[in-house]
Image (cartoon, rainbow, N blue to C red):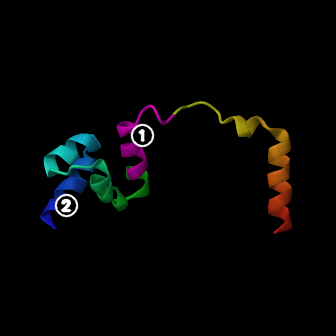
Amino acid sequence: MLRHTKAVHMLESGINLIYIRDFLGHVSITTTEIYLKVETELKRSVLERSYPDVVTQDIPKWKEDTELLQWLNDFCCQL
């Protein structure tokens, strides 16, 4: 329980997930990601900091596809 609490506090303090992995002695970052189950917003911010190349501020191309958006809107209205 102390180990889990320490990991969560480190996450809340903004420490990079890689450093927490090393601190806990995990071989895989996937094991450390278990500690991200605490809070959705915390998970999002930590993952964005850990994997900055994955997150972009670009608008997805599908949001500009009016035909697709219309089809999705029609599909949702049919349910």
Q: Which mark is residue 48?
A: 1
Amino acid type indicated by mark 2: Thr
Give how far across and how far down residue 48 sits, in percent: 42, 40
Residue occupying the point 36% across, 44% down: 46
Q: Which residue: 26% across, 49% down? A: 28
Which region of the structure is painted magenta? 43-55
* Residue 38 picture quarter: bottom left
Residue flagged by tag 1: what amino acid is it? Glu
51 relative position to 9: left or right? right
* Residue at the image position 56 percent from the left and 31 percent from the top: 57
Is residue 15 one of those drawn in magenta? no
Looking at the image, is 60 positioned above or below residue 69?
above
Residue 6 visible in the displayed image: yes
Verify whether residue 54 appears in magenta: yes
* Element at label 2: helix
> Looking at the rendered structure, which numbered label has been put on residue 5?
2
Mark found first going from the N terminus, 1 or 2: 2
Q: Is residue 29 left or right of residue 62?
A: left
Looking at the rendered image, the quarter that the N terminus falls into is: bottom left
* Tag count: 2
Is residue 14 something that shows in the picture?
no
Q: Residue furthest front?
A: 27
